[in-house]
Structures are given as C-alpha cells and as structure tokens.
Amino acid sequence: MAMEAAEIERLIKQGLPDADVSIRDLAGDGNHYAATVTCESFRGKSRVQQHQMVYAALQGQMGGILHALALQTNVPE
Amino acid sequence: MSIHDFIDSQVKSNDVVVFMKGTPQFPMCGFSGQVAQILNHLGVDYKGINVLDSDEMRTGIKEYTNWPTIPQIFVKGEFIGGCDIVREMFQAGELQTLLEEKGVPVMGKATA
C-alpha cells in the first residue's frame, strides 16, 4: 500500500484550504515523504497542534498506509 | 490497570519518557533511533518503552496523545511530539531550553 504525493497534497489542502503545501518523495516507494506546510491557521498554535491539524486532514492515513511523513509546519511571514 | 492508566503513570513518574520501537540501546526504527541519538547527545536520562512488546501499547499510546506515529516523547508528563518536532526543537536549541526550564538535568557533551 502506498500513497501518491499528489494525493497527500490534495488531502492536506482539502483539510486546510489556506495551506501552501510542498511534498518531497524521499524514497520513491510511495511510503516516505517530507512535507512542508505553511498555513495562516497555524498561527498561535504549538507545533504538536499544527502537526495534528495536518494529520487530521490526512484522515487517518498517517501511520497507516502512509508510513513516514517528515513534517515541517510554518506560519506565513 | 488499563493501558491508559499505565501510560499515564509512566509519563508522570519519569522525567523523560520515549515510547519507541526498540530500546535506547537497540532502536528498531530510524525515527526512534534519531530521538535516542539526540537525547544521548544531550546526556539526558530517559525511560524507553518499547511499543513493539505489545500491540495494546502500540495503539494505546496513539489514542492517549491523539498522535498517529511512533516515537512519542514526554517531558515531565507533557507530550512534546514525535521525531520531527524533537529534531526541529533540538536544531533550534528549544529542546535544551525546555529541558532546563523543566529542571531536567542535561549533561551535554563534555567539550575537550
């Protein structure tokens, strides 16, 4: 089981409409990605909360079919 | 004792707890290994709990924190995050500050 980068980006944007998302495929196996998500709605939230917002957008895929997503969350300058 | 109560007691009775795959000496996953490396580098004593020992623990910890992946790091009972967050905090020096603020001894690398 694996996920396509475009699918990850679509899910995150669907859950966080104002997010800017960039995905890097780390291993080419559909299982190891790095994602940078910049979003106004992260402002004032802790890193844990920001990451939980992204995981919620991924609707439970995280830790399941998506084994590894190295996540970097930012607030727009 | 329920798995939730066990986890609760562990995170509240140890300064630093890492729910990980494998043990501090033999991490079984790259992400768990990275966290062990960072804590070892800082000279922080921590309790490693191997989630591979029990499926109940492996799912229980994810429910306890509403966090989908392993490893998971706690300092003085507070959930800090997973590998990404701990690495990001370490690189920014925030992890060292947090540990000091919480009164967790940080030996750090003895510089020659």
Image (cartoon, coloured by chain):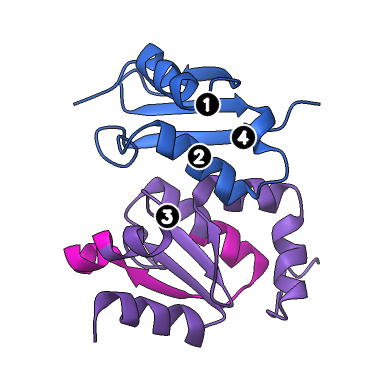
Residue beneath label 4, please? A73
Q: How many marks?
A: 4
Alpha-carbon distance for marks 2 and 1?
8 Å
Q: Is tag 2's residue or tag 1's residue first in the polypeptide sequence?
A: 1
Residue B55 appears left or right of B16 = left
Alpha-carbon distance for marks 3 and 4?
20 Å
Where is residue B22? Give x, y as percent: 32, 62
Where is residue A43? Give x, y as percent: 71, 38
Q: Are marks 2 and 1 in contact (CB under 8 Å)?
A: yes
Alpha-carbon distance for marks 4 and 1?
12 Å
Query: Label 1: how many residues lie within 10 Å, few (<14), some (14-19) or many (20+)?
Result: many
Q: Quadrant of residue B96?
A: bottom right
Does the image show residue B21? no
Residue beneath label 2, please? A53
Considering depth in this image, is B7 or B86 the residue closer to the camera?
Answer: B7
Badge nearest the viewer, 3 or 2: 2
Looking at the rendered structure, whether the residues under marks 4 and 2 are on a common chain is answered as yes
Q: Quadrant of the N terminus of chain B?
A: bottom left
Q: Quadrant of the C terminus of chain B?
A: bottom right
The tag on residue A16 is 1
Q: Main secondary structure of the magenta part?
A: helix
Q: Are marks 4 and 2 in contact (CB under 8 Å)?
A: no
Q: Is tag 4's residue or tag 2's residue first in the polypeptide sequence?
A: 2
Considering depth in this image, is A68 or A49 the residue closer to the camera?
Answer: A49
Residue at position x 72%, y 45% in the image: A44
Give the colour chain B carries in the figure. purple
Residue beneath label 3, please? B32
The tag on residue B9 is none
Element carrying mark 4: strand
Range drawn in magenta:
B36-59
Alpha-carbon distance for marks 1 and 3?
29 Å
Question: Magenta span has B47?
Answer: yes
